[in-house]
Amino acid sequence: MSNPKTTKTAITPRRDEDFPEWYQQVIRAAELAEPSDVRGCMVIRPWGYGIWENMQRQLDALIRATGHRNAYFPLFIPLSYFAKEAEHVEGFAKECAVVTHYRLKIDEDGGLVPDPESKLAEPLIVRPTSETIIGASYAKWVQSYRDLPILINQWCNIVRWEMRTRLFLRTTEFLWQEGHTVHETEAEAREETKRMLGVYETFVREHCAIPVFAGLKSDSEKFPGAVETMALEAMVQDRKAIQAGTSHFLGQNFARASGIQFQTREGKQEFGWTTSWGMTTRMVGTVVMAHGDDDGVVLPPRIAPTHIVILPITTRQDTSAKVLETCDRLAAELRARKYLDDVAIEVEVDRRNLGGGVKNWEWIKKGVPLRVEIGPRDLEKNSVEVSRRDQEVKAKESMPLEEFAARAPEILTSIQDGLYARAKKFRDANTRVIDSKKDFYDFFTPKNAAKPEIHGGFALAHWNGSREIEEQIKNDLKVTIRAIPLDDSSEPGKCIFTGGPSARRVIWAKSY
Amino acid sequence: MSNPKTTKTAITPRRDEDFPEWYQQVIRAAELAEPSDVRGCMVIRPWGYGIWENMQRQLDALIRATGHRNAYFPLFIPLSYFAKEAEHVEGFAKECAVVTHYRLKIDEDGGLVPDPESKLAEPLIVRPTSETIIGASYAKWVQSYRDLPILINQWCNIVRWEMRTRLFLRTTEFLWQEGHTVHETEAEAREETKRMLGVYETFVREHCAIPVFAGLKSDSEKFPGAVETMALEAMVQDRKAIQAGTSHFLGQNFARASGIQFQTREGKQEFGWTTSWGMTTRMVGTVVMAHGDDDGVVLPPRIAPTHIVILPITTRQDTSAKVLETCDRLAAELRARKYLDDVAIEVEVDRRNLGGGVKNWEWIKKGVPLRVEIGPRDLEKNSVEVSRRDQEVKAKESMPLEEFAARAPEILTSIQDGLYARAKKFRDANTRVIDSKKDFYDFFTPKNAAKPEIHGGFALAHWNGSREIEEQIKNDLKVTIRAIPLDDSSEPGKCIFTGGPSARRVIWAKSY
């Protein structure tokens, strides 16, 4: 690694100087998104939306492959629906956008105001999640066990009013998918909850190149109204945890609230067993924080809107036509090849009339996996200069044009794999088995007051299951239980805070 | 054609008995969508949403191929933005959902109410269209002619409060795409407006199998705030017109309202020239009304969620395993083939334990292009029974299994082409050149009071361009000018209402 003190980076500040500010600058430099004038709502710019579209298409294929179909339910939820599940309403009441009127009028002063005559008898909530509105439909669709399971997913926008927002990570409006299923038995619903967590794990690991821990949430971190919430926790480069997909076993709570009842095989009436699960545009921010470097975004090829950018060097008049022609020919050759699951390679020839350095840095900051320069000297040798975004930004490899065209899919795969390996190494290096309260407090206490953004990492420690301890740790250190791991690798032990019995180690961290 | 009086149809009433009611029943029988308990909002069920997903993917590819990229802008528009363009606000003020609070609380009676302390200083409008909110971003992005053109599209939900709603055709919430572009010159913006109308025409004709007339809207039918609105008009089976895609040349109106200014090549400051264009979930309803028959939906293969359904006949125990195995083998063979532009053939084997007749009729009502039955007798002959949805529902053709597998792409293409030809023949048969006021009034006046749903069709008639005449015709007959055709085939003539000069014939019709 080069010396960070002497090397100028494209992003200021560097990650180790001020991670939150680095994040904002990276998002801006890559033109992923920007704040809008509407409080808490962001504008997702084409490059950022292109990443989301790739995530969406690929996750959608996994959701379909597990037998789910997409549908669309109303944006608005009548207040009375929303109030049906007590914990649910308590969880969301404080962050709801409320529609109260359906018309505007010009008032006496000539100003535009909500028309008082159009006041709604019952206010409408802009969906913060759709369990209650979808439940109302399911209650109509489900009569008998023969109608089950119902396996539906929805891609849509969501509104949860936020006071302190951060692009992609926490915004008043965001985009997501929400799956909502109904099952005949508790066992099937529990199995579905786990299956969809598994789908997310596959997606995050194989498509976003990010390792995750899968686990249960403690009661205090559960989805409002759920019996059990499962989640994936990823570590980003300030060593904080970020939730990457959740899957909820809702028991019969929402079925009871919405009246989803069916006749069983034995002819009795029973409430359905429901699940819900979601992944959001937050994942775009997670990818930035997991893979980005001091020069900007670094995109895993699978979710990059453009895999390869070709940069023609047309400084010499006599060769520029030939250079452009060669670039176009290479682009056509690359586009004819497939990458991984039959994904066509997306190639852009950047013909803009700007300096080569300016263009090169723009693409570095955007995180395009491969940059290819072709200039007059390359023509003579029939070669190209290739730069991988996962390597030093100044590293270039010269290779014969035909060889590059043939090897591009393999190089992209190697970048994808390399990013995963690097993220896993980082995560593992910052995940610590901790066996005493002192070590735990030390781990999460900044050693250097000048760098407030050191967060310790993930601590695997025994805990007696008490909510009071959770509260205490949260108050002392801003650290919470991120996941109670689902796998069976942990042995029973003693709670490091109380000495009481503990069934297994749980994962603690500061989190987004 | 069979005698409608004696043949029982799957949908009651038939089209010729009560077209609006037929439409509602078809939508219900095919499980495309249903009303929700939220006033004016519909639930789009998986089969209906699957059609929309296909439309979306295919139209999106056409939009990308013309150089546009997708992005996402906020759902909410501050009231003050919305008020910036006078005609615009006048056009939409009466149908806006208004957000006034951002929190709920429990009141003294224990009821859930909007928290008065969370009242917004400035109300937010749920977007009825996004010119003003997107314009605010463009104003920041555009500084110089070098930043132009901006070519962006957005897929999203839209809210326009409706009192009288009809599934897909008119709902308070609907889904659409909206393109928003900024150009350096008027000529470029006008060219873009036309180009995108052309994209829609290609999409509606080639993907939805519906012929359209392309034309300008008269001033009274323009988009609020536009200089010029172009639209496609399709005819459905009650001979009414329905708008299938619009493209607006906005001049500098919205650029002025939003402050989209740039430095020209000559160093002056000028306002940008903008366009916007959209197509909505209304297109799903248009397809139903254009192609449906008295047995339900008839889907053009290109937009059908499932192209071929295979129905195993497993009544005989001794052969049922073999039948299912043959069905699966055929499905796998079909899935390996491509249809048209490299689209994989979507095949479903319906193994549900229901009667063959019940299943067959379900798929007829859903409009699946091809149904294939395989039973014990077919096994012996190694043949299949094929039914095309564009032919008599009882017509079946027996053909060797291998031949069917090989010919399936060609049969699907022939269904697609046949539906277009049928719709065009119907449209042409009901489009009349009319040269007198009397003939015009006769054409649009029901000849038979018992059948109130006869609408004449499209009348091509000369008009002097006056708004008063338009008003008069609308009041007398509920007929409006649907399009002023863009092509140059019409000769000048005399207005049939006033005798005044007319530059060309325009298209008149009743409309949705």
Image (cartoon, coloured by chain):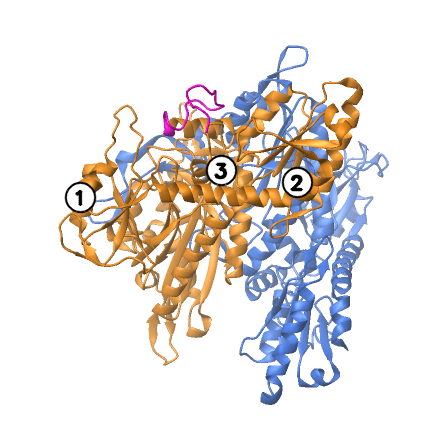
Chain colours: A orange, B blue
Q: Is mark 3 on a helix, strand or loop?
A: loop
Residue at image mark 1: A437
Q: Nearer the viewer, residue A223 or A365?
A: A365
Q: Residue at the spot x=74%, y=66% of the render?
A: B408
Rendering coords of residue B200 (x, y %): 69, 43
Q: Do tags 1 and 3 sit on the same chain? A: no
Q: Do tags 2 and 3 sit on the same chain? A: yes
Q: How many marks?
A: 3
Rendering coords of residue A458 (x, y %): 31, 43
Residue at image mark 2: B63
Q: Does the magenta stretch include residue A17?
A: yes
Q: What element carries label 1?
A: helix
Circle 2/circle 3 CB separation < 8 Å: no
Does the magenta stretch mainly form a helix, a strand or a loop? loop
Q: Nearer the viewer, residue A270 or B128?
A: A270
Quadrant containing the C terminus of chain A in the rendered view: top left
B153 sits to left or right of B232: left
Segment colored magenta: A1-20
> Residue B60 occupies which quadrant of the picture?
top right
Q: Is mark 2 on a helix, strand or loop?
A: helix
Residue at image mark 3: B127
B416 sits to left or right of A430: right
B381 sits to left or right of B106: right
